[in-house]
Amino acid sequence: MNHTTQYPEEYIKYLVYFHGERDYFECHEILEEYWKEKEKPELDAAWVGLIQVAVSLYHQRRNNVKGAIKMMRSAISNLTEIDLQMLGINAKVFLEQLRSRLTNLISNEALVYEDMNIPLKDVHLIKKCKQLCKDNNLSWQSHSNINDEALIHKHTLRDRSEVIKSRELAKTEKNKK
């Protein structure tokens, strides 16, 4: 893929959440929904791997080192150079970043959270993401606001009523079959 029109909109949103808002929970949500609902299995492992990278960073930022390690290991096992290249990512650099972060997490050197950037190499994709950040008053590759409780603890603070309602409806429909 070499033009942003070839990338799923959800992937572009993931990148904006990842690099602009540093909202790793939303990264996970938007890409997971896309992954579950798309019809073709292409890049399934890559989508899962990118979701796991975001979840790992979310855990790490919350000082859940065990969760961060588990997700980072899974992400590394799911991501391949070929898939990452298809997504406009410098695969070798990104995989090395992930391995290095995992090593630091395991050795407890990474207890102080640091943001990371996905090394994109598709200039059209970078331009599109930067423009979306600008349109939403975000700074591309900004730092996490560690003092923003809603960002740091989003999964515990969000309204789950719609999710619960949707799951109950799906369960009822399944039981009818």
Image (cartoon, helix red, strand yellow):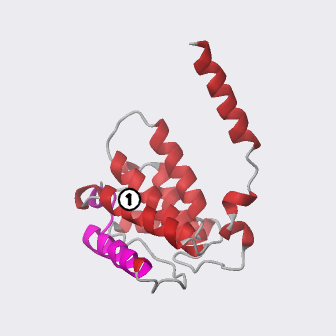
Please, is residue 144 above or below residue 168 in the view?
Answer: below
Looking at the picture, tell me which residue is in the foreground, 46 or 69.
69
Please indicate, yes or no, whether residue 4 appears anywhere in the rendered image.
Answer: no
Q: Residues within 10 Å of mark 1 (few under 14, many from 20)?
A: some
Please indicate, yes or no, whether residue 143 appears anywhere in the rendered image.
Answer: yes
Q: Which residue has dot 1 on it? A: 74
> Which residue is found at the position 40% from the left and 51% from the top?
47
Is the C terminus in the top left, top right, bottom left or bottom right quadrant? top right
Dot 1: what SS?
helix
Image coords of residue 86 (percent x, y):
28, 56
Q: Quadrant of residue 92?
A: bottom left
> Which residue is found at the position 60% from the left and 65% from the top?
23
Q: Quadrant of residue 120?
A: bottom left
Answer whether residue 94 is magenta in the image. Answer: yes
> Which residue is found at the position 38% from the left and 59% from the top?
74
Image coords of residue 132 (percent x, y):
56, 64
Region of the chain picked out in magenta, as a range:
84-105
> Which residue is found at the position 73% from the left and 55% from the top?
158
Q: How many marks?
A: 1
Answer whether residue 83 is magenta in the image. Answer: no
Q: Quadrant of residue 112?
A: bottom right
- Horizontally, residue 92 falls left or right of residue 145, namely left
